[in-house]
Image (cartoon, rainbow, N blue to C red):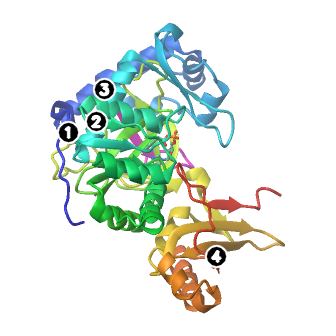
Amino acid sequence: MKNPVGSWIFQPEFEKMPRNKLASLQEERLIKMVKYCYENVPVYRRKFKEAGIKPDNIKSLDDLEKIPFTEKEDLRKAYPYEMLAANLCDVLELHASSGTTGHPTTCAYTKSDLEVWSQVMARIYASAGTRKGDIVQNAYGYGLFTGGLGFHYGALEIGATILPIAAGETERQITLAKEYGTTILACTPSYAAHIGRYAREKMGVDPAKELKWKSGLFGAEAWSEELRERIEELLGLEAFDIYGLSEVIGPGVSVECPQHNGLHIQEDHFLPEIIDPKTGEKVEEGETGELVLTTLTREATPVLRFRTGDITFLKTEECSCGRTFARMGRIYGRVDDMIKVRGVKFWPKTVEHALLNVKGASENYEIIIERPEELDIMTLRLEPNKELFESVNGDLLKLQSLTKEIEEKVKSIVGVKANVELVPYGTLPRFVGKAKRVKDLRKAI
Ligand code: DLL
């Protein structure tokens, strides 16, 4: 990275709190939260009864494991209002998660929840160097998806100027970035890459030279280190990974600091654990497993030990940025997104990591898995980058060495054979929100 943006700390009284003081604060909040959930949400009362515990049994952080998990299915069944712990008349905002794999779930916010959301988002902006005077181009989708409004509230809280352009209309994104001189870009990483390519290839604009973007706040989907490098080069900015989920608050759970060595979790509001997804047992610090989060301050839709389905690890060692909050590794993928081909398990992100290691491969790809007879077949449909595509005048047969190189990389990194099928540049779908790159046709049968 050419010019690191540096960062600052929005709420040092929390973000730099000694870990023993932080633990006391978390304990105090946890005990209150458990009682609050028990008293106000019948679903929690039932779960506690089934587990044979009462709120009084939770006296310290060590008792956390006694609390039953909350699963996505619990929230789905409770749709629309059964998980609400506050009075509906105190709810100021309602969001519903998209429910691509089932019924939607509700995430509601009271005034206090919106304040917390604004504050944790302001911390995230500060971590990425954003200050008053910056102009934030918010290209996350506005609406029921929490990305748009979360980034909106955080920018207001920090006193930056916001351009609420939302996702899509790529040409306009670039034109307005130029005209308004926006300095921060917020969107999904796949959309950031698309904006960069579009600017160069369709508009003759080199964002790294002609736009003022200094940092990018990218999240909502798993992305690889290789994609980060490409985005930073394409857009001439420093890319920060931002993590969050609607059930817990939306974006705002964790963010990278300029060390880019894990994402600091806003631990005064969200209590993290890592469990073995199969056994539900807590794993040792540093070991990989499923992230479980408990909200410590949420009023409208609090969650106790929510199983996020996201795979990562935790470390509490000190970070040179000064923040004391634990860091989680970048998300590998989701438990339920893990692909199993011929017995080999891997996440789509590993495929991205393999193919972006090959020069000439673009970041536009699709993973297709079929089972025509007994055996699984994985096909990787991929566009070569524009320069390479044009250098052979679109004759993909001339790129057989690229095909072979990718097949070898995927075999060695992912551990499974993929048939690579090159397709003309510009023919695969581009995404303005979360990218959908895997087509598992076995499930459709
Ligand atoms: O995606 C909230 C968000 C918006 C986060 C904008 C960051 C930026 P949901 O739509 O509920 O909320 O999706 C949550 O997306 O459980 C992860 O599987 C995935 N996810 C979110 N951030 C990341 C990330 C928003 N940085 C689900 N890396 C989560 C990997 C991510 N996966």
Badge 2 amino acid: Thr
- Helix, strand or loop status at disc 3: helix
| Vertical comparison of 390 with 442: above or below | below
Real-space Cα separation, disc 1 to disc 4, in angstroms: 44 Å
Real-space Cα separation, disc 4 to disc 2, in angstroms: 41 Å
Q: Mark 1 points at which residue?
A: 133
Badge 1 amino acid: Gly
Tag 4 and tag 2, C-beta contact below 8 Å: no
Q: Which of marks 1 and 4 is nearer the N terminus?
A: 1
Real-space Cα separation, disc 1 to disc 3, in angstroms: 38 Å
Q: Mark 3 points at which residue?
A: 27
Q: Mark 4 points at which residue?
A: 423
- Helix, strand or loop status at disc 4: loop
Q: Which of marks 4 and 3 is nearer the N terminus?
A: 3
Q: Earlier in the sequence, mark 3 or mark 2?
A: 3
Viewer-side label of 3, 2:
2
Q: Mark 2 points at which residue?
A: 161
What's the magenta region?
Answer: 269-285
Q: Is residue 309 left or right of residue 183?
A: right
- Helix, strand or loop status at disc 2: strand
Viewer-side label of 1, 3:
1
Residue 250 position, x and y percent, is 45, 35
Viewer-side label of 4, 2:
2
Real-space Cα separation, disc 3 to disc 2, in angstroms: 37 Å
